[in-house]
Image: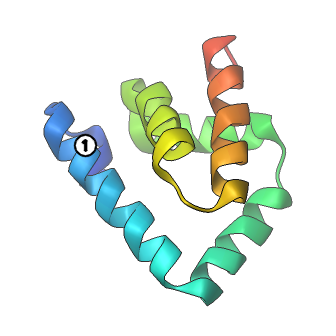
Amino acid sequence: MDVGLRNEDATVRAEALRVGIQALEAAPELRSTVIAAMNGMDEAALSAMLRGAAGAHAEEVAMHIATQAQAFELRAKASAILQRLRSGG
């Protein structure tokens, strides 16, 4: 996933995200664990984590999750992170 998020090819990044989201949503226990972990962190920490993982593509990744994830919790958190990233956070 890390290699996919930092790839210069937008198609590769989109496919890595699609596969990652699909895998997360197909595993209820994993999804619950990830959502619980995210709920235990504020948007500043999550934004910094995403910037560290995706670099210059952090906003793109957040937008993709916000629009493509099925789980409401993932979409909502990604939207909040996207807003923070866009405001310079």
Residue closer to the observer: 50 or 71: 71
**Where does residue 12 sit, x and y in percent of width and height?**
16, 45
Asked whether the viewer can see residue 4, the reply is: yes
Is 14 left or right of 63, judged from the image as shown?
A: left
Residue closer to the observer: 76 or 85: 76
Q: Which residue is mark 1?
A: 13
Residue beneath the point at 51% across and 85% down? 27
Displayed quadrant of residue 70: bottom right
Relative to 15, say whether 62 is above or below: above
Is 22 left or right of 83, judged from the image as shown?
A: left
Residue beneath the point at 79% across and 70% down? 36
Is 3 left or right of 58, judged from the image as shown?
A: left
Where is the N terminus found, in terms of image quarters? Answer: bottom left
Displayed quadrant of residue 61: top left
- Alpha-carbon neighbours of circle 1 within 10 Å: few (<14), some, or many (≥20)? many
Residue closer to the observer: 64 or 48: 64
The type of residue carrying mark 1 is: Arg
Residue beneath the point at 60% across and 44% down? 49
Is 54 left or right of 11, judged from the image as shown?
A: right
